[in-house]
């Protein structure tokens, strides 16, 4: 067994990390950094240190984990949470507080976003509590500190910063009324005793974590998540993880761009935006009129009749139009987003980002074959388009093409390493 394999196996055992999901180079770089920090130990010497030092084990984990999060990431998830929380309180006649879990909570942006969303929706502090958990003590400590730089505030709508933060020299400090709603702790999702004595949660957020595990670990973690979620609760996941939950028996609650799943067949969501319409025909990509039989996708919803919509207004700035597409898609306005994509392709050169959005919109609508075609067009234009690589990998895996999915995940990891190297220059 090579020395590198030993470290891969250690991280798989401790945090479930599948080396193929991030690439071997990321782990090798972390091992080199830690070895150099310990007076340049050899690989064998560092392995021996790792076996005898709990602190060094955690240090290696910290070197591999790179938190990437911001407030109100996937904004429709939080809007959906607020609606469901109001409905849930009515169902239980306000007899007890709602319990919400965020894991991994990273540096706190997600659990604090949950608290802000519920406070802004009119919930009183005694009506809900948020629990945040992460395997990284450093991330949890940063979350407890509650001070954030500009990188944590992204997107066009950051009005919440004025309501819930105060500016100071080193960033923005979150208000005590938000902080008091969130309890933060260190915990490992692979721990069989994780929250064993805790009641189940009404809502669980576990986003963009399952994609870093192999299939066996994904199933193991899913069983833990299912056990933590109330039978009538809702699980929020990342956009690339929907097909996995669909295969494991969960179903989308049918709210576009919320990436929310239910484990109880009778649960119905609170009032939600209008359902997705069937994909509009596009002059760029010709599709056969004959229906194609395919397995239902986890984000699929009932198909309503096609209705004419007004094309997006002409914009000379391609960047502005791309921003409009992203905004419409993130707001769940799938028809308008698709029309904006088509308008872009009619008035600008082909763009990988536009084909990516068309693929994601088709994926969300349940048209997996159409989505695959759009994703491949995006990769033809930009072979290392990371979002497309990850989404197409998930799509292929849901269709049983595990080898193809792994190849795309490896390409995505190489793309991320290249981007890291470029940023470090």
Image (spheres, rainbow, N blue to C red):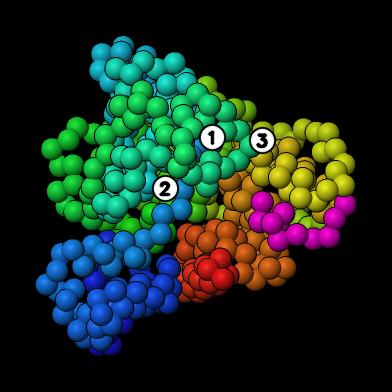
Residue with the mark numbered 1: 76
**Residue 84 or residue 115, whichever sits in front:** 115
Comparing labels 2 and 3, the label whose residue is closer to the camera = 2
Measured as percent of width and height from the top left, residue 301 is found at 56, 38
Choose the circle earlier in sequence order: 3 or 1: 1
Tag 1: Cα neighbours inside 10 Å, few (<14), some, or many (≥20)?
A: many
Mark 2: which secondary structure?
loop
Q: Is residue 188 above or below residue 179?
A: below
Q: Which label belongs to residue 207?
A: 2
Q: Which region shows up in magenta?
A: 347-357
**Residue 108 or residue 411, whichever sits in front:** 108
Label 3, label 1: how far apart the Cα atoms are: 11 Å
Residue at the spot 37% in from the left edge and 41% down from the top edge: 108
**Residue 276 or residue 83, whichever sits in front:** 83
Dot 2 and dot 3 residues touching (CB under 8 Å): no
Residue with the mark numbered 3: 333
Residue at the spot 46% in from the left edge and 48% down from the top edge: 69
Say left or right for 35 vs 374: left
């Amino acid at each position: 067994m090579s020395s590198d394999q030993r470290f891969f196996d250690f991280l798989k055992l401790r945090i479930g990390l599948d080396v193929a999901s991030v690439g071997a180079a990321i782990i090798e770089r972390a091992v080199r950094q830690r070895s150099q920090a310990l007076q340049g130990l050899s690989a064998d010497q560092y392995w021996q240190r790792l076996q005898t030092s709990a602190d060094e084990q955690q240090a290696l984990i910290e070197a591999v984990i790179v938190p990437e999060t911001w407030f109100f990431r996937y904004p429709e998830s939080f809007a959906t949470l607020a609606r469901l929380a109001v409905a849930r309180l009515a169902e239980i006649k306000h007899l007890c507080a709602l319990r919400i879990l965020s894991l991994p909570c990273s540096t706190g942006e997600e659990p604090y976003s949950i608290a802000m969303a519920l406070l802004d929706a009119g919930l009183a502090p005694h009506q809900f509590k948020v629990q945040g958990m992460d395997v990284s003590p450093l991330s949890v400590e940063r979350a407890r500190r509650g001070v954030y730089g500009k990188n944590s505030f992204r997107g066009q709508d950051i009005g919440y910063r004025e309501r819930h933060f105060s500016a100071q020299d080193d960033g923005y400090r979150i208000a005590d009324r938000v902080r008091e709603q969130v309890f933060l702790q260190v915990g490992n999702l692979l721990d069989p005793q994780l929250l064993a004595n805790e009641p189940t949660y009404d809502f669980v957020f576990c986003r963009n974590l399952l994609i870093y595990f192999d299939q066996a670990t994904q199933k193991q973690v899913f069983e833990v998540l299912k056990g933590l979620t109330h039978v009538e609760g809702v699980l929020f996941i990342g956009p690339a993880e929907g097909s996995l939950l669909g295969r494991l028996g969960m179903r989308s609650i049918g709210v576009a761009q919320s990436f929310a799943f239910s484990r109880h067949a009778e649960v119905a969501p609170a009032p939600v935006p209008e359902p997705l319409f069937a994909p509009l025909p596009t002059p760029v990509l010709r599709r056969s009129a004959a229906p194609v039989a395919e397995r239902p996708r986890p984000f699929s919803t009932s198909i309503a009749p096609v209705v004419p919509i007004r094309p997006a207004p002409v914009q000379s700035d391609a960047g502005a139009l791309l921003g409009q597409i992203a905004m419409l898609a993130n707001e769940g306005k799938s028809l308008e987003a698709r029309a904006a994509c088509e308008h872009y392709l009619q008035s600008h050169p082909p763009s990988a980002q536009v084909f990516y959005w068309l693929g994601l919109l088709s994926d969300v609508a349940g048209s997996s074959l159409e989505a695959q075609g759009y994703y491949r067009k995006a990769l033809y234009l930009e072979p290392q388009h990371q979002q497309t690589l990850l989404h197409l990998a998930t799509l292929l895996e849901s269709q049983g093409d595990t080898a193809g999915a792994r190849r795309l995940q490896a390409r995505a990891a190489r793309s991320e390493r290249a981007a890291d190297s470029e940023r470090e220059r």
